[in-house]
Amino acid sequence: MASLKWEARRILIWGKTYPELSSKYFETVCTGGVFEDTGSPVRLYPIPYRRLEGNGRFSKYQWIKAVVAPNPKDTRPESYRIDANSIALEEPVPTTKDEWALRASVLFKDPAWQFGSVDDLITAQNARRTSLGVVFPRTVTGVEVVARPPEDQLSFEEKINRLTEQIEIDKRQLTLFAESVPAEMRDLEFLSHRIRINWLCLNPNCQGHKMQVLDWEVAELHRREGDRKALDKVKEICDLSKYATRFFLGNMLLHPTSFTIVGIWYPKKVPGLLFR
């Protein structure tokens, strides 16, 4: 820890993925944002999101100040560790008629992480290990519910069992996390299905992309309200005749050229305002 280059940064949050179980960090969230000074994207991980006290929780499009450092165990340049205890919240970007323009002025200040096609993003990944990118959909061809493979649920259950065993064995750890850890693990549901968007990017030769949506808001709506409400919402914001939709794409450490949708940008199209 002492060798990490920690520094205080101001960050605008643009997305969070649905909480996952970690054998080391319990329940964690992968969070996306941009640095205020550079406009460059940042992946903050791990954050034990639901263990943060009420005043330490943050929402989408909210400014935070936190002490962060490049993650030495992650070769992706956007990946940073965060001192969760250092998180200080500021006001979200105001809800006004100009809110999307204000957000865009920060989120898209750096053109280096904006791409016209998934191929361009993968080219950047091969050249610079780029792992986060904003990509414009040219056409959305479908939105559907897909089942996750059985091995995903098996992995989830194995992690639950390992964490329970750790708590039973390590009494010091049990004291540290108190009774909230088992409760949190029980509350975190395994989502057996996900929303998937089928779409074409701006590459004129695009053969189509099928990407699952890992965005927390979409996953939580799906969990609470079921397939129909989640499908209707995602179909609505993917209507490119009404919304200036962009996809925030992110990859996995072990699968660097495989990208999924980790956030969705969806301001309504307004005459005279250009978000693209």
Image (tube, grey):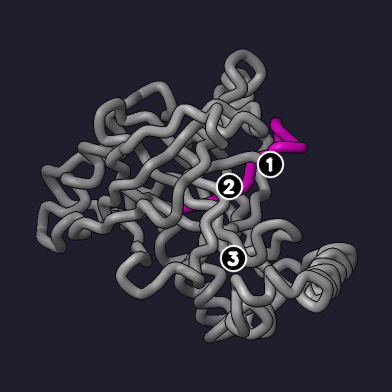
253 left or right, relative to 72:
right
> Can residue 204 be seen from the camera position used here?
no
Give coordinates of residue 126: x percent, y percent: 66, 18
Q: Residue at x 68, y 35 (%)?
A: 207
Q: Residues within 10 Å of mark 2 (few under 14, many from 20)?
A: many
> Can residue 66 be seen from the camera position used here?
yes
Give coordinates of residue 151: x percent, y percent: 89, 63
Q: Residues within 10 Å of mark 1 (few under 14, many from 20)?
A: few
Is residue 270 highlighted in magenta?
Answer: no
Q: Identify residue for label 1.
A: 252
> Which residue reaches farthest front?
172
Magenta range is: 253-263
CA distance separating discs 2 and 1 = 20 Å
Q: Which quadrant is home to the C terminus?
A: top left
Please tell me which residue lies in front, 4 or 75.
4
Q: Is label 3 in contact with label 1 (beta carbons under 8 Å)?
A: no
Q: Identify residue for label 2.
A: 199
Amino acid type of the residue that numbered disc 3 sits on in the rendered structure: Pro
Secondary structure at numbered mark 2: strand
Amino acid type of the residue that numbered disc 1 sits on in the rendered structure: Met
> Tag 3 or tag 2, which sits nearer the N-term?
3
Give coordinates of residue 192: x percent, y percent: 75, 74
Q: Which quadrant is home to the N terminus?
A: top right
Please tell me which residue lies in front, 59 or 238.
59
Q: Identify residue for label 3.
A: 19
Amino acid type of the residue that numbered disc 2 sits on in the rendered structure: Trp
Q: Residue at x 48, y 57 (%)?
A: 16
